[in-house]
Image (cartoon, rainbow, N blue to C red):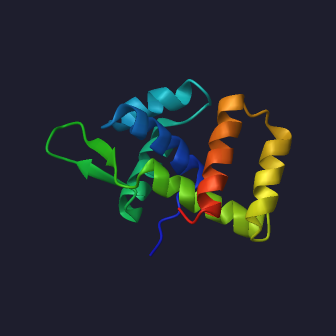
């Protein structure tokens, strides 16, 4: 079964990926920097994430520490697959054209894209 984090869960995962192990308080304090978030809401979300298998919880200390089980790459792939299938009706080309048309890519990014496309064309 594929695990699909929600937008709120992805926000929490971003914090955990950056910090490593985190308490609910650690995550809550980071969330407060960008939005109004209730502590109990953060706690409940992290409990749900544990139940879903997105994070593991170390309960050996008084303060429980959470660590991501799902990798950033897995989450990105899941989110991208969902966007391609729903927003772009399965067209990867439309996604790339839209992304490049609305975001200014640096010369290095454009070269990385060219290099990737050459590899794909050559079967690598």
Q: Viewer-proximal residue, 41 or 13? A: 13
> Residue at position x 63%, y 58% from top?
80
Q: In the displayed image of the protein, which residue is found farthest to the left?
A: 60
111 vs 13, left or right, is right
Q: In the displayed image of the protein, which residue is found farthest to the top?
A: 33
| Residue 12 drawn above or below residue 79 | above
Residue 117 spot, x, y in % from top left: 66, 54
Instruction: Please tell me in which quadrant of the rendered image residue 23 appears.
Output: top left
Q: Viewer-proximal residue, 107 or 41? A: 107
Residue 4 spot, x, y in % from top left: 53, 63
> Residue at position x 43%, y 58% from top?
48
| Residue 115 drawn above or below residue 103 | below
> Residue at position x 25%, y 41% from top?
64
Q: What is the total number of numbered labels drawn onto the structure image?
A: 0
> Residue at position x 71%, y 38% from top?
110
| Residue 17 drawn above or below residue 74 | above
Residue 89 spot, x, y in % from top left: 79, 70
54 vs 60, left or right, is right
Instruction: Please tell me in which quadrant of the rendered image residue 109 appears.
Output: top right
Q: In the displayed image of the protein, which residue is found farthest to the right?
A: 101
Quarter of the rendering occupied by the N terminus: bottom left
39 vs 112, left or right, is left
């Amino acid at each position: 079964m594929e695990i699909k984090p929600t937008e709120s869960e992805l926000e929490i995962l971003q914090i955990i990926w950056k910090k490593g192990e985190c308490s609910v308080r650690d995550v809550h304090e980071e969330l407060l920097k960008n939005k109004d978030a209730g502590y109990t809401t953060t706690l409940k979300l992290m409990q749900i994430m544990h139940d879903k298998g997105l994070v593991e919880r170390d309960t050996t200390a008084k303060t429980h520490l959470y660590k991501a089980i799902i990798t950033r790459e897995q989450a990105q792939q899941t989110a991208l697959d969902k966007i391609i299938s729903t927003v772009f009706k399965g067209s990867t080309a439309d996604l790339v054209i839209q992304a490049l048309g609305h975001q200014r890519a640096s010369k290095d990014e454009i070269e990385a894209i060219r290099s990737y496309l050459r590899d794909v064309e050559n079967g690598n």
